[in-house]
Image: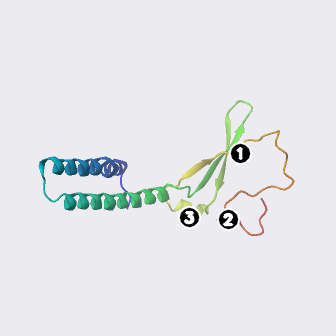
């Protein structure tokens, strides 16, 4: 389940602002005026906040999964002689699979900054996560 940004923000406000304020208000009112069933009302209110918070967390995970880089990465390769950025495209999914999707997400992958004072490594280091490494493929 993925909520729209408007509904997600409203849910966040409800869980983070409204419910704690309501619990504090009701508890204080009960202390000074003698409102009944304080434990029941505040307990149920807290349970509602936890339940809605769990739904929001589920929506947040679904949103992140939908918006992760499923197509690949733009790589900033520097600039040309006119100062225009040079951009490469690292496609990490079969183009036939990408062609079947309604949307494809690409992320920007900035290369590490070269430090001339740092010693050069004799062998290249493969910084890719293990699930992206292909056995027998060099860096």
Relative height, residue 104 to residue 75 (above, below): below
Is the Cβ of the residue at disc 1 closer than 8 Å to that at disc 2? no
Which residue lies at the image location 71% right of the left edge and 30% below the top edge? 82
Which residue lies at the image location 16% right of the left edge and 60% below the top edge? 37
Relative height, residue 135 to residue 4 (above, below): below
Per the image, the residue denoted by label 3 is 97
Q: Is tag 1's residue or tag 2's residue first in the polypeptide sequence?
A: 1
| Of 79 and 66, the residue lying toward us | 66
Q: Which mark is residue 112?
A: 1
Give x and y (percent) for residue 8.
Answer: 35, 51
Which residue lies at the image location 74% right of the left edge and 69% below the top edge? 135
Q: Is tag 2's residue or tag 3's residue first in the polypeptide sequence?
A: 3
Give x and y (percent) for residue 109.
Answer: 64, 48
Neighbor class of circle 1 (other Cα within 10 Å; few <14, some 14-19, many 20+) is: few
Per the image, the residue denoted by label 2 is 130
Which residue lies at the image location 79% right of the left edge and 62% below the top edge? 138
| Of 25 and 91, the residue lying toward us | 25
* Residue 102 visible in this rendered orientation of the protein: no
Neighbor class of circle 3 (other Cα within 10 Å; few <14, some 14-19, many 20+) is: few
Q: Is tag 3's residue or tag 1's residue first in the polypeptide sequence?
A: 3
* Placement of the N terminus among the 4 image quadrants: bottom left
């Amino acid at each position: 389940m993925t909520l729209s940004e408007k509904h997600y923000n409203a849910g966040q406000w409800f869980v983070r602002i409204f419910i704690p304020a309501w619990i504090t208000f009701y508890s204080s009112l009960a202390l000074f005026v003698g409102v009944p069933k304080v434990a029941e009302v505040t307990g149920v209110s807290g349970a509602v906040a936890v339940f809605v918070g769990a739904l929001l967390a589920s929506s947040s995970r679904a949103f992140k999964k939908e918006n992760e880089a499923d197509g690949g990465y733009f790589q900033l390769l520097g600039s040309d002689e006119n100062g225009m950025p040079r951009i490469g495209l690292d496609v990490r999914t079969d183009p036939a699979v990408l062609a079947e999707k309604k949307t494809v997400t690409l992320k920007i992958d900035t290369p590490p900054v070269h430090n001339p004072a740092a010693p050069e490594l004799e062998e290249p280091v493969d910084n890719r996560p293990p699930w992206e490494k292909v056995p027998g493929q060099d860096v």
